[in-house]
Image (cartoon, rainbow, N blue to C red):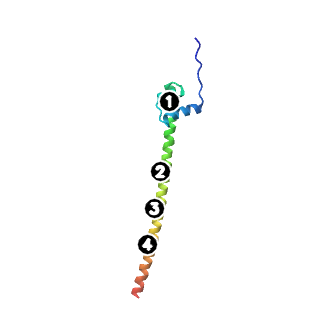
Amino acid sequence: MAKRQRRIFSTEFKHDAASLVLDQGYSFAEACRAVDVHENTLRNWVQPSAFEFKAKASIRACILATEFTSCVLQELKKTATVVLYKYTVLRGCYGTSITRVGT
């Protein structure tokens, strides 16, 4: 009986196989059949990729929150500038009209 030769998979192949489960919604069984590997092998490839996937998602969420906060702050600055300008203009008109009335 001939001994079965151990297969060697490239990192890119492992990443693509893991992305079937993580990104494309395949079940482990479906993905295993598609790439012709044992389920435990695929689980070993998915586990580090899942951690990396979650880390990237967390970073994306932080970036989006930062961008959102930045946009909100810009809008608040614009609003504050408009309010301050209107207040200054109205105060100036109000102040001059009182001075004229009083003299």
Q: Are marks 1 and 3 in contact (CB under 8 Å)?
A: no
Lower sequence index among marks 4 and 2? 2
Q: Are marks 1 and 2 in contact (CB under 8 Å)?
A: no
Kindly identify the residue that appears in the image at 49 percent across and 26 percent down.
Answer: 39
Residue behind mark 2: 65
The residue type indicated by label 2 comes to: Ala
The residue type indicated by label 3 comes to: Leu
Determine crowd level at label 4: few under 14, some 14-19, many 20+ residues with C-alpha closer than 10 A.
Answer: few
Query: Is 82 rendered above or below residue 62?
Result: below
Lower sequence index among marks 1 and 2? 1
For label 4, the SS is: helix
State the separation of the CA atoms marked 3 and 4: 16 Å
On the image, which quarter does residue 12 sit in? top right
The C terminus sits in image quarter: bottom left
The residue type indicated by label 1 comes to: Ala
Residue behind mark 4: 87
State the separation of the CA atoms marked 4 and 2: 32 Å
In the rendered structure, find residue 76 and report the number of the disc placed on it: 3
Determine crowd level at label 2: few under 14, some 14-19, many 20+ residues with C-alpha closer than 10 A.
Answer: few
Lower sequence index among marks 1 and 3? 1
